Image: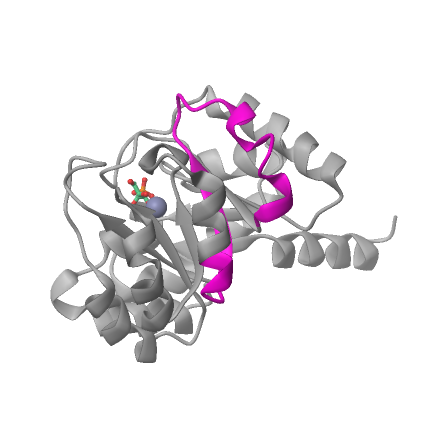
């Protein structure tokens, strides 16, 4: 293959990978500006981590803050709910401007009902698997979801180390998605950096969440940090 074709192939591969920076690592006192800055720096989505101090051992933000941030985001909001219960809050997050709403199946007794409610609210449906959650939880849900979020750390905090065992799970999920013939995004969240990103993409991920790796070095570095993650697709 000639040099030009190689470059084209790399560019396509890099463009195929979606980057969703987690604003958990942003400066919370300047959240609107931070959201605008990562959008200008070339991210594809804005990952919003919602925690309730009950499903996970940390508290973050609720629908009113998401609503206030929405006008600052020129990219779609990828809202990751680490809360239980989920159903009573779906409408509020949809109204706040979420494009994707992702929930954890352990958060309630009826994940199928929750998926239907997210869809009915006009959002894309994401399901998140904790490091110890088996892929079999998706067996009867593949037809009802738009995105699978693999947690490669235990949810609750930014800045944790990538859990290697999740690479096998990503490969298994890639095979399940391909076999389903459905257009399901495979997103990976936790400990994703320039080094782990290449392995995560090689295992089959199509979308990367990155908090620490996006926000390190401050606003002047956001574009470079996001590009470096995207370039992992061709390493
Ligand atoms: C953890 C959150 C992640 C987290 C990622 O519960 O779901 O989105 O902020 O942070 P990093 O990229 O720093 O591991
Ligand atoms: Zn997250």
Q: Which residues are magenta?
A: 118-145
Name the residue rendered at 46%, 19% in the picture.
165
Can you see residue 167? yes
Name the residue rendered at 70%, 57% in the picture.
12
Name the residue rendered at 36%, 36% in the picture.
191
Q: How many numbered circles does the render carry?
A: 0
The image quadrant where one finds the C terminus is top right
Name the residue rendered at 56%, 30% in the picture.
170
Task: Please indicate whether residue 126 sits to the left or right of residue 153 in the image.
Answer: right
Task: Please indicate whether residue 31 sits to the left or right of residue 133 in the image.
Answer: left
Give coordinates of residue 57: x percent, y percent: 16, 35
Q: Residue furthest right?
A: 1
Task: Please indicate whether residue 25 sits to the left or right of residue 121 in the image.
Answer: left
- In the displayed structure, 79 sits above or below 130; it is below
Give coordinates of residue 226: x percent, y percent: 44, 57
Give coordinates of residue 134: x percent, y percent: 49, 22
Task: Please indicate whether residue 189 sits to the left or right of residue 161 in the image.
Answer: right
Q: Which of the pair 160/90 is nearer the observer?
A: 90
- In the displayed structure, 207 sits above or below 199; it is below
């Amino acid at each position: 293959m000639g040099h030009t074709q190689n470059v084209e192939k790399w560019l396509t591969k890099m463009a195929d990978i979606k980057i969703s920076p987690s604003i958990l690592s942003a400066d919370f006192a300047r959240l609107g500006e931070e959201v605008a800055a990562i959008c200008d720096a070339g991210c594809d989505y804005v990952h919003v981590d919602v925690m309730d101090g009950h499903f996970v051992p940390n508290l973050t933000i609720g629908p009113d803050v998401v609503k206030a941030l929405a006008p600052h985001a020129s990219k779609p909001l990828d809202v990751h709910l680490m809360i239980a219960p989920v159903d009573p809050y779906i409408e509020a997050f949809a109204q706040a401007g979420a494009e994707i709403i992702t929930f954890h199946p352990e958060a309630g007794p009826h994940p199928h009902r929750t998926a239907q409610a997210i869809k009915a609210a006009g959002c894309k449906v994401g399901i998140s698997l904790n490091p110890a959650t088996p892929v079999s939880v998706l067996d009867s849900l593949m037809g009802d979801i738009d995105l699978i979020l693999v947690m490669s750390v235990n949810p609750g905090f930014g800045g944790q180390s990538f859990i290697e065992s999740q690479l096998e799970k990503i490969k298994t999920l890639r095979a399940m998605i391909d076999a389903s013939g459905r257009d399901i995004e495979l997103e990976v969240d936790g400990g994703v950096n320039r080094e782990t990103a290449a392995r995560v993409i090689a295992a089959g991920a199509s979308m990367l969440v990155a908090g620490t790796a996006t926000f390190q070095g401050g606003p002047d570095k956001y574009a470079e940090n996001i590009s470096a993650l995207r370039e992992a697709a061709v390493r």
